[in-house]
Image (cartoon, rainbow, N blue to C red):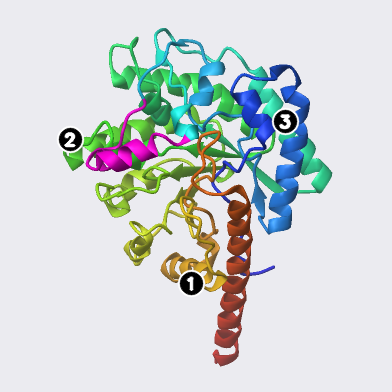
Amino acid sequence: MAHRILTTHTGSLPRPSELLAALAGKHNGDADPKLRAAVRACVERQVRSGVDIVGDGELSKPSYSTYVSERLSGFAGRGRLPAPADVEEFPTYEARLFSDPGIAALQTPLCVGPVAYVNRRPLERDLENLRAATDALDVKDAFVTAASPGVIALFLHNEHYRSHDDYVMALAEAMRAEYEAINAAGFLLQIDAPDLAMDRHMTMAKADLNQFRRRVELHVDAINAATANIPARRMRLHICWGNYEGPHHRDVPIADIRSELLRARPSGLSFAAANPRHEHEWASWLGVSLPEDKYLIPGVIDSTTNFIEHPELVSERILRYVNAVGAERVQAGTDCGFATFAGMTAVDPGIAWSKLEALAAGAHLASSRIRTTVARHSLSAP
């Protein structure tokens, strides 16, 4: 259908309680059959909710970044989860944020040796489970998330490599195997790279903007090197400023890093655009000439609050981007995941699914309005 805005999301969706127990180290013996059934149910619910480009909900992963420690060599022990600078300014809120069960339970091992991709079984299991679900439900397109070299380095601190640069490039070479396997399986590869924005108010909080831009350039170089063998159109890149309901007053504006983001090879760019700190940034895309192969996936649903967005508002948010870059360059997404860390409780599971339904309803409204506008222009043409 011409001028239909496709819908998708960022990756993580609510995990069933039995999977949370398995991820916590309980009942591991029967986790796999439960996981396959849960992925099937998750995909089926996405389809019912109106999501066009679905994923496996990251149901098998404790988080979108730290999961790599069971697939890569070189990690051991437990490091400290870094606190964002904006949150540190408000100690009472910091204590509340870090008491969330999902965040409190997160394991962040350290890099203590050379990294290499040594355990492919979890990846193969995830690809098999998603393939079984999409085949059974006749889903046309699906994506699989994978951590960027930079976000791994952000959460799993380096105690082995001589420099941050060396560590990130070693991670890029190691993760190449996962990226290429996802593409070879016929899925869209989503590289999760919150570091490209979030690290500005984390490890780079005391650096100046130019220093941070150089860090972003390095991390983009690592992504580009690791994905050199994958067609750009079969990839998308997700960036955000941290998926937490917090101050965010130290977030770097997207306009300040846009040129670096658009240099990354993936064609799709997914980013937070619905929360109160970034909703206004649609205007920064006005007059921007996107590279020919690029399209935007703005978040039009907030992933940190329990408000269910009205479809009219969702439509309005979508149409702002359509007016800025064109309908053919826009898909509708979410700011981030709804269960970034297993057990995270910020958004009620039932509300998360209702938000996806609101996403689909808003995209339907936006698509109808685009088609009406096109028809009017056609009738008025000489």
Quick check: 141 above or below 113? below
Quadrant for residue 217, please give it.
top left
Q: CA distance from mark 3 to mark 2?
A: 43 Å
Three-letter residue code for mark 2? Ala
Question: In the rendering, at what x and y percent does residue 136 appear?
Answer: 83, 43
Residue 161 in view: yes
User: Which comes before the other along the chain, label 2 or label 1?
Assistant: 2
Q: Nearer the viewer, residue 288 or 108?
A: 108
The numbered dot on residue 35 is 3
Mark 3 touching mark 1, by CB under 8 A? Answer: no
Which image quadrant for residue 374? bottom right
Q: Under tag 1, what secondary structure?
A: helix
Q: What's the residue type where badge 1 is placed?
A: Glu
Q: Residue, x 28% and y 35% (percent of image)?
A: 202
Q: Is residue 62 magenta?
A: no
Q: Residue at x 61, y 14 (%)?
A: 119
3 vs 2, front mark: 3
For disc 1, the marked residue is 316
